[in-house]
Amino acid sequence: MTESTNPPGRSANRSPQSHRDASQTETESLELRLFLEAIYERYGYDFRDYARSSLKRRLTKCMTDAKVETISEFQARVLHSPENMEQFILAMSIDVTGLFRDPNFYAALRNKAVPVLRSLPFIRIWSAGCSTGEEVYSLAILLEEEGLYDHCRIYATDFNEVVLQKAKAGVFPMRNMKAYTASYQQAGGTRSFSEYYTAKYDNALMRTSLQKNILWAQHNLVTDASFNEFHLILCRNVMIYFNQSLSAQVHELIYESLAPGGFLGLGSSESIKFTRHESDYEVMDAKEKLFRRKDQSAG
């Protein structure tokens, strides 16, 4: 009998190159798991249930910028250098935003949520994952035009303190204002958009009065609990970066935080379908992903 020359568990028809590729993939997968665990243990940021494709893309950019070739090398940098950790946190922050981005969503909010919010003596709003604040200022402008801003409070939160500081400053590139003006008008804006900012060199400074009812605070949707009851929650284009189990966890947090009869706005690629609370919401605008929590006590 001829003795097999293949090591245990190795298929005879697999090439040495395919074995090397498989081994490298397994090693990188192990490195990634260890890296995410280390980040959680060292800094308290939990990215373990983020969607792997997005996470790997952002991590690869960080590694390229840091001029390292392996995740293990970058892990050592991050664990021993807060500056490298800050770079990673910035890379993981949701940075695709803009004033009145998705203007039809704001039009739906103006037409379908505002008439209900108008009946409340005081309105609590949560902008979750607010990034650099464009969504928050858009909300403030909309509410002022509807005569509601003086009796509301917007809680603007993000896990990244650096982007929160940028949001507080309210300074945006002047080159973007033309596009923002068009979005504002499409969203149903009733004034000249230039009333809401002052041009200074290459920047636009948002009017300081828009800040008066905004509370900026650090909050992590992954690890932190509900902190209030809200009449409107916007959590737009945040959960697209989460896997299914983490999305379910965040949906639970949102539901716990939303007052009966309150409104929820999601991003265009997000949904309440197949979540535990799908039947607990009324669809206000299916296309613009605007929902309203049913008031169970009223039924």
Image (spheres, rainbow, N blue to C red):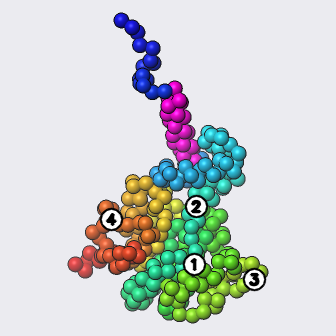
Q: Nearer the viewer, residue 1 or 201?
A: 1
Q: Please, what secondary structure does the residue beneath circle 4 have?
A: loop
Q: Is residue 252 above or below residue 127?
A: above
| 299 to the left or right of 55 | left
> Nearer the N terminus, badge 2 or badge 3?
2
The residue sitting at 54% across, 39% down in the picture is: 28
Q: CA distance from mark 1 to mark 2?
A: 17 Å
| Residue 297: x %, y % from top left | 26, 77
Residue 273: assigned label? 4
Q: Which residues are magenta?
A: 16-39
> Nearer the N terminus, badge 1 or badge 2?
2
Q: Residue furthest top?
A: 1
Q: Nearer the viewer, residue 171 or 221?
A: 171
Q: Please, what secondary structure does the residue beneath circle 1 have?
A: loop
Q: Nearer the viewer, residue 206 or 293?
A: 206
The residue sitting at 68% across, 43% down in the picture is: 68
* Pointer 1 with pointer 4, Cβ within 8 A: no
Q: Disc 1 designates what residue?
A: 99
Assign the magenta stretch its main secondary structure.
helix
Residue 93: assigned label? 2
> Nearer the N terminus, badge 2 or badge 4?
2
> Nearer the N terminus, badge 1 or badge 4?
1
Determine which quarter of the picture holds residue 38. Answer: top right
- Residue flagged by tag 3: what amino acid is it? Lys
